[in-house]
Image: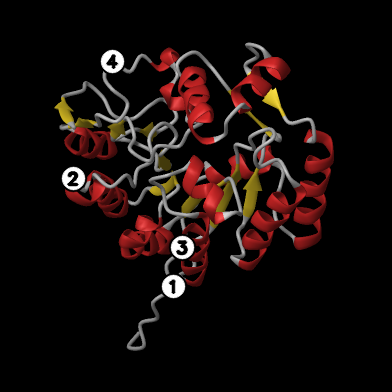
Amino acid sequence: MHFIKVKGILSASNGMNLYRGCSHGCIYCDSRSKCYHMEHDFEDIEIKGNAIELLENSLKRKRKKCMLSTGSMTDPYIPLESKIGNVRKALALANKYGFGFTLITKSDRVLRDLDLLKSINDKTKCVVQMTLTTYDEDLCKKIEPNASTTKERFEALKKLNEAGIPTIVWLCPILPFINDTEENIRGILEYCIEAKVYGVICFGMGLTLREGNREYFYSQLDRLFPHMKEKYIRTYGMQYQLSSPKHNELMKLFHQICEGSGIMHNNSKIFEYLYSFEEKNSPIQLNLFD
């Protein structure tokens, strides 16, 4: 790990990345792509040393409350968070100043901060987004080696629901010839139904590969799935968007199951929900002595 100082922490859409780089080791991670200009080893986590100070200054100055977000580039609950605590500090600031919050993770470490998530959600809205890629635990350990397993994430989703925290699942990526099966999609969605998730985001059955990401992904295919790299190259060449040959049938199944279970599955509506700030009314206090 290494520390840097930055000039700002919130993006124009009120997102933040408290860390850069990741140690979860997911073989398909788009954040490895060269277009993001990460000038250090991906596993050498960059910590923004002045992030919390900048965040508090920004929240103090904001005229309108809004939803804050984190996790789009780096999972906020990498193991290093247990030592540094920047995510918990950011949640505490959101709670202090009355802002909503949403985060994306693959870790059941999110439960450590259940007290703050509940406190934020009591006043406004706090949504936990969880990525699920494969129902098979052994396969999960191969393609997401250092993240919580799918079963562990499912158990976390249930506990979040029991605490009243709304949850969203990202069903992605679906790796062609690896986890693009009906059994996998049904298994993940059964978890979503049991955990009572609010919605499931799915942009299609496939994945994206860019320079930097592609080379790492192919090296991992060579290690974990012999001859699979050659099949990818024959099928897709240098394409950016790699759609599963089963895309249409699996998307039809996805929408059917979500619709039949009352789970939101319209991406646009889910994003509208995620980023719309709402302030919950405090209970009316009656003065019995008036």
Mark 2 neighbour density, 10 Å: few (under 14) some (14–19) many (20 or more): few
The residue at the point 30 percent across, 50 percent down is: 91
Q: What residue sits right under mark 3 in the picture?
A: 156
Of callouts 4 and 1, which one flags the residue occurring earlier in the amino acid sequence?
4
- Residue 32: image x %, image y %? 42, 23
Quarter assignment of residue 290: bottom left
Q: Is there a contact, CB below 8 Å, between mark 4 and mark 1?
A: no
Q: What residue sits right under mark 1 in the picture?
A: 283
| 10 left or right of 81 in image | right
The residue at the point 76 percent across, 49 percent down is: 182
- Residue 162: image x %, image y %? 50, 72
Up the image or down, 228 lies above or below 271; here it is: above
Real-space CA distance between mark 1 and mark 2, rounded to the nearest whole angstrom: 36 Å
Real-space CA distance between mark 3 and mark 2, rounded to the nearest whole angstrom: 22 Å
Q: Is 211 in front, or is 90?
A: 211
Q: Is there a contact, CB below 8 Å, between mark 2 and mark 4?
A: no
Q: Is 173 in front, or is 47?
A: 173
Disc 4 is placed on an element classified as loop
Q: What residue sits right under mark 2 in the picture?
A: 84
Q: Is there a contact, CB below 8 Å, between mark 3 and mark 2?
A: no
Q: Nearer the viewer, mark 1 or mark 2?
A: 2
Residue type for callout 3: Ala
Label annotation for residue 39: 4
Residue type for callout 2: Ile
Of callouts 3 and 2, which one flags the residue occurring earlier in the amino acid sequence?
2
Real-space CA distance between mark 2 and mark 4, rounded to the nearest whole angstrom: 22 Å
| 187 left or right of 94 in image | right
Mark 4 neighbour density, 10 Å: few (under 14) some (14–19) many (20 or more): few
Disc 2 is placed on an element classified as helix
